[in-house]
Amino acid sequence: MDESTTGAVPPRRSGSFRARLVGLVPSAFYRQVSYLTAATAASQVVSLGATVLLARLYAPVDFGRFSIAVAVATILATAATLRLEMAVPLAEDDREAATVALAAFLLAVLAAVGLVAALAVTVLLTGSARVGLGAGLSIWLVPPAVAALGAQAAFRMLLSRQQRFGVISRTRFTASLAQNVVQLGAGRAGLGGVGLTVGFVVAQVWNTVAMWRSCGVRSVRLRDCRAAVARWRRFALLLLGPSLLNTATVSAVAPLVAVCYGVAVSGLFTFSTRILTLPATLVGQAVATVFYPKMAEQERTGVDLEPAIRRAVTGLAMLGTPFFGLVMLLGPDLFAVVFGEQWRAAGLISAVLAPWLAVSFVSSPLSTLMTVKKQLGRLLVLSVLETSLRFAALSVGVLRHRPMLGIAAYSASGVLICLYYVRWALRAAGSRLRSWAWANRGYLLVTGVGYPALLLLRQPLPRPWYVALTLALTLLLLGWAARWLWRAGRGGDGVPSPVARRVTPVAVGATE
């Protein structure tokens, strides 16, 4: 099968580094991820620089209130769209995809209007503008955030299907710039958590308007939306339960942490995850944005997914491990030096969460494969199990009156769940976790011995020696990742070349 048919680039044994990088994956995939990664890198550089300043303008309690408002908006936005946006890549044609995206947007707007009415009624009944939940006055910014977040989810999926990743990249960068400028100005004005939330809402609205103007939904007839909702309603509702559970216990866990340990601890938790998710946003989110539409397309056309899945697992593992490993070993000191001594506790939380986020960095882009494979029942069961484990983990800290113990248990439960997602993704693609581990046994041996050894030697070793050994291990693993990238570009990484093969679709997971 030739290149024009498969859309893949055969491995190259000579040429520039860029040519070798292109040889890792189909060229279109490489360009698309590159667009998103470059723009995300620029926005994250801006965000990291701004965070250093924000850490000196805001207290942990301010970040706690901000995180609760954003978490509530994220959960409600997930419910508002009924997860219709996940049907956009699966639609039969672009016209139907645009109709589904517009329907999701309209649902988010209606939900926001309903929230405004609910808040107004609450004020009339209670006589207070502070509704509660620990967010303070920031709760009034939740309705516009719900509308913007729901619209973004739909429009981003549509732009991804249209392969207009340049638009996504530009809007992401400008929104990040707007958010940080507003938050810094609000911090100087002493607005506290409300100022952080205002910056967030401004950025989301900015991003939504920019994507709205570019994605082509304005040509869709409103009367077609009802039919689109009716067709995809069952699919979306099957995804809604797992999505809400996952959002409430992972990406929007701040209210739960605040209930268990207080708003200040919630602020420290949120600040630590804000920093730790930088690499996930930089690479993992870029891969996920391209990955889901691509996997959906290849599944429809019967293309073998195994080479892409194995390479994704290996590449993400090698890219994520050095960063999260460094935070696990030096987190408190790094946070104290960069952000100030008041954030040392956030560095300790980051060190505890690092193992989970390292595995999550690999599993998050792969988790959409369950949707592609229509394994929605399994996804629901896993989401219920994950929610139960995370609630139980945080409860341990409450019962023992030790927040760090609960956060450690929360991290451990996340590791178990994410490892299962990786195992399932490999199995669904026709591979096995055991065979992948054997193919990468040298790397896993070094990380499996190196990190525990350094953790044990943290106290006995003089501090300079400990830091030097940590940096040496980090540089070794970064070099290993670069070597794998180079060899993979030459077809020598020990996995099948990325030439797509057409296979007969089969039921996945029936025998597991």
Image: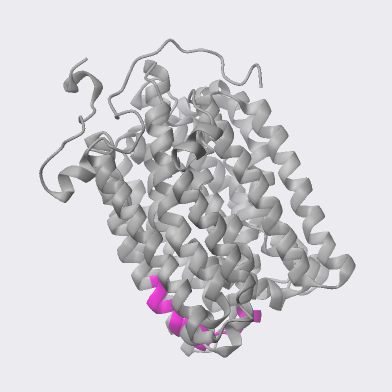
Q: Between 452 and 4, which is closer to the camera in this rendering?
A: 452
Q: Between 51 and 364, which is closer to the camera in this rendering?
A: 364
- Report whether 336 appears left or right of 474: right
**Residue drawn at the location 52% of the way across and 48% of the way down:** 150
In the image, the segment drawn in magenta is: 47-62
**Residue drawn at the location 46% of the way across and 13% of the way down:** 505
Q: Residue furthest left?
A: 15
Instruction: Evaluate whether residue 204 shows in this view.
Output: no
- Report whether 9 appears left or right of 250: left
Instruction: Evaluate whether residue 160 shows in this view.
Output: yes
Q: Position of residue 182 (x, y in %)?
A: 42, 76
Q: Position of residue 412 (x, y in %)?
A: 69, 55
Where's the N terminus, which quadrant?
Answer: top left
**Residue drawn at the location 62% of the way across and 24% of the way down:** 234
| Image quadrant where residue 11 sits | top left
Q: Residue furthest right?
A: 399
- Report whether 41 appears left or right of 127: left
Q: Between 340 and 245, which is closer to the camera in this rendering?
A: 340
Q: Give the answer, above or below, for where 225 lies relative to 179.
A: above
Query: Of helix, strand and loop, which mostly describes the magenta segment?
Result: helix
Q: Between 112 and 263, which is closer to the camera in this rendering?
A: 263
Q: Is residue 51 magenta?
A: yes
Q: Give the answer, above or below, for where 44 lies relative to 344.
A: above
**Residue drawn at the location 32% of the way across and 56% of the way down:** 171
Q: Give the answer, above or below, for where 46 lies relative to 480.
A: below
Q: Residue furthest top?
A: 504
Q: Give the answer, above or below, for where 455 lies relative to 76.
A: below
Q: Is residue 497 magenta?
A: no
Q: Position of residue 432 (x, y in %)?
A: 53, 29
Q: Position of residue 292 (x, y in %)?
A: 43, 35
Where's the C terminus, which quadrant?
Answer: top right
- Report whether 65 appears left or right of 357: right
